[in-house]
């Protein structure tokens, strides 16, 4: 099954921006569960777009003004939710931020 | 054995097996329902089969095959299903299906209310109507909750299995918590006593399926010991009767003996956890011939072994006060009287009780009044008001 790990943190998470992933990526690559992912620039550099009545509306910043923001994402492909939980729990960001695990909608 | 008994006993096994075979929760339940309906029709004429569980499972399995045959999507599942001998026992390395079902229903990725509802539906065989009634929500709400939970299991990939050994220590408490919550739902409300019965039944099953888990036995013992006192906890008009004033001849002494035996065998494993310790406290109460014989020092020592939550600290203070005298108790309670227990009616109620025992009547009355204002159930309010009257007369 495919899951998206959304790696979230509050402002303090910025301190960890250059920490690296402490061997997590290497381990997951070796296990063959990584299917993509990236770290993200901070939400202050985000642009939000929506189209209403054919007008393109742009907003500076993230779409939701919450304290916790997505700092990166990883797409994994593993057996089940228990394995996804185990993978997410091993990610260093789980130690200071939160990681949301979302199953990816299966294709038709 | 009545049909109702067979239903209660076999439902969980039939559903659990069908889920393993088909991987489809809705289909499993539907086929189980049809199998029981068929039994209700056939058994009065043909007689109850020797192994009703096997008859029901085979019938349900045949319904599933029929259904999958009609649905092209089921081809692969159908081949797997049809390849099994009709009456096959599960292979030896497969743990009991009901245990898988229990761990899946109680997966921590599900909301607590969903875990409870799903356990009652799939393992205990309660209808959606019954569960909705027990939790005082409209049937449509409960039905949605159950559907959502089953969808999450399927879509989020919650595995249908007993977790591997390394996950058991962190997952078993979730199962025990659900069963204890169920029990308390039934125990705290006279209308919902059936839930306590189901919780005990499921705990027995868990102990049978996980004989090496002493905390499961501890929980079963705890429930048996509490439940043995059920009938004496309230007066006929619904007012709380405290342990001290309960009619001990009306306790279920066979059940107490069973609870103590289950607890003893659990404790012999030398891994006491919170449920075993709480059961030991309940056993101290249940085995005292009279309230005055209660071994309060032992109870205080047991409470000291539990994680010191505010409520545990309060219970421990009560035990110390009963063992060493109300003046000591009042002092220990006084040290607690702040923070997380603010607004909890048992804090002023405990203080009131010690003040009453010290014959400080007017202070006791004030504390009872404070407790009455905070009490959450009619039964407790009734009891506290009775006490307030007593101390007011004396004061």
Image (cartoon, coloured by chain):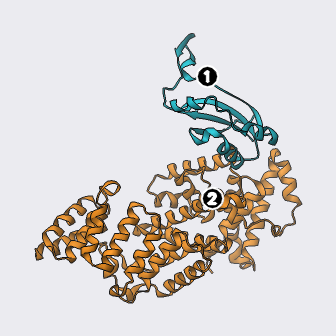
The quarter of the picture where residue B247 lies is bottom left
Label 1 belongs to which residue?
A41
Task: Answer with left or right where residue A24 lies relative to residue B269.
Answer: right
Residue B218: percent from left, percent from top: 55, 74
- Dot 2: chain letter: B
Tell me the tag on residue B171: 2
The residue closer to the viewer here, B125 or B240, is B240
Against A73, is B134 above or below? Answer: below
Chain B colour in the picture: orange
Task: Answer with left or right where residue B50 lies relative to residue B323.
Answer: right
Tell me the tag on residue B231: none
Residue B63: percent from left, percent from top: 76, 59
| Residue B31 shows in the view | no
Chain drawn cyan in the picture? A
Q: Which residue is drawn at 58% across and 70% down?
A: B215
Q: Residue at x 54, y 62 (%)?
A: B177
Q: Given contact means CB atoms under 8 Å apart, are the residues at marks 2 and 1 in contact?
A: no
Structural crowding at the residue carrying mark 1, measured as other residues with C-alpha within 10 Å and reported as few (<14), some (14–19) or many (≥20):
few
Q: Which residue is drawn at 60% across and 64% down?
A: B125
The residue closer to the viewer here, B224 or B150, is B224
Q: What element carries label 1?
A: loop
The residue closer to the viewer here, B245 or B280, is B280
């Amino acid at each position: 099954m495919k899951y998206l790990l959304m790696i979230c943190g509050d402002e303090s998470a910025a301190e960890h921006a250059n920490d690296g992933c402490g061997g997590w990526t290497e381990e997951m690559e070796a296990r063959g569960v990584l299917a993509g992912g990236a770290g993200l620039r901070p939400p202050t550099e985000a642009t939000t777009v929506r189209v209403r009545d054919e007008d393109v509306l742009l907003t500076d910043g993230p779409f939701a003004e919450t304290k916790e923001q997505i700092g990166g994402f990883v797409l994994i492909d593993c057996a089940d939710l228990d394995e996804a939980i185990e993978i997410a729990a091993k990610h260093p960001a789980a130690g200071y931020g939160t990681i949301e695990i979302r199953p990816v909608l299966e294709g038709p | 054995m009545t049909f109702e008994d067979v239903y209660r006993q076999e439902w969980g096994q039939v559903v659990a097996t069908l889920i393993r075979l088909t991987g489809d929760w809705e289909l499993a339940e539907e086929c189980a329902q049809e199998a029981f309906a068929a039994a209700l029709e056939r058994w009065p004429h043909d007689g109850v089969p020797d192994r009703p569980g096997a008859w029901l499972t085979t019938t349900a399995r045949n319904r599933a095959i029929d259904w999958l045959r009609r649905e092209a999507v089921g081809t692969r599942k159908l081949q797997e299903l049809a390849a099994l001998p009709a009456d096959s026992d599960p292979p030896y390395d497969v743990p009991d299906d009901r245990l898988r079902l229990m761990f899946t229903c109680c997966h921590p990725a599900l909301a607590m209310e969903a875990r409870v509802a799903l356990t009652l539906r799939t393992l205990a065989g309660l209808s959606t109507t019954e569960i909705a009634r027990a939790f005082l929500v409209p049937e449509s709400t409960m039905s949605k909750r159950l559907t959502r939970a089953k969808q999450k299991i399927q879509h989020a990939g919650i595995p249908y299995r007993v977790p591997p050994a390394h996950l058991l220590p962190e997952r078993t408490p979730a199962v025990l918590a659900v069963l204890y919550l169920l029990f308390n739902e039934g125990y705290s409300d006279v209308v919902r006593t059936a839930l306590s019965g189901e919780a005990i039944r499921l705990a027995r099953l868990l102990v049978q399926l996980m004989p090496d888990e002493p905390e499961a036995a501890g929980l079963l013992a705890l429930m048996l010991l509490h439940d043995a006192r059920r009938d004496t906890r309230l007066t006929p008009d619904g007012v709380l009767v405290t342990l001290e004033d309960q009619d001990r001849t009306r306790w279920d002494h066979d059940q107490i003996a069973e609870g103590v035996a289950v607890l003893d065998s659990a404790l012999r494993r030398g891994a006491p956890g919170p449920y075993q310790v709480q059961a030991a406290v309940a056993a101290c109460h249940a085995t005292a011939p009279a309230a005055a014989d209660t071994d309060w020092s032992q109870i205080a020592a047991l409470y000291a072994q539990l994680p010191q939550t505010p409520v545990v600290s309060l219970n421990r203070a009560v035990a110390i006060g009963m063992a060493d005298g109300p003046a000591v108790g009042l002092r220990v309670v006084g040290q607690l009287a702040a923070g997380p227990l603010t607004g909890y009616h048992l804090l002023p109620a405990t203080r009131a009780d010690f003040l009453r025992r010290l014959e400080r009547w007017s202070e006791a009355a004030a504390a009872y009044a404070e407790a009455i204002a905070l009490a959450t159930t009619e039964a407790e309010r009734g009891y506290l008001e009775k006490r307030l009257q007593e101390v007011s007369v004396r004061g």
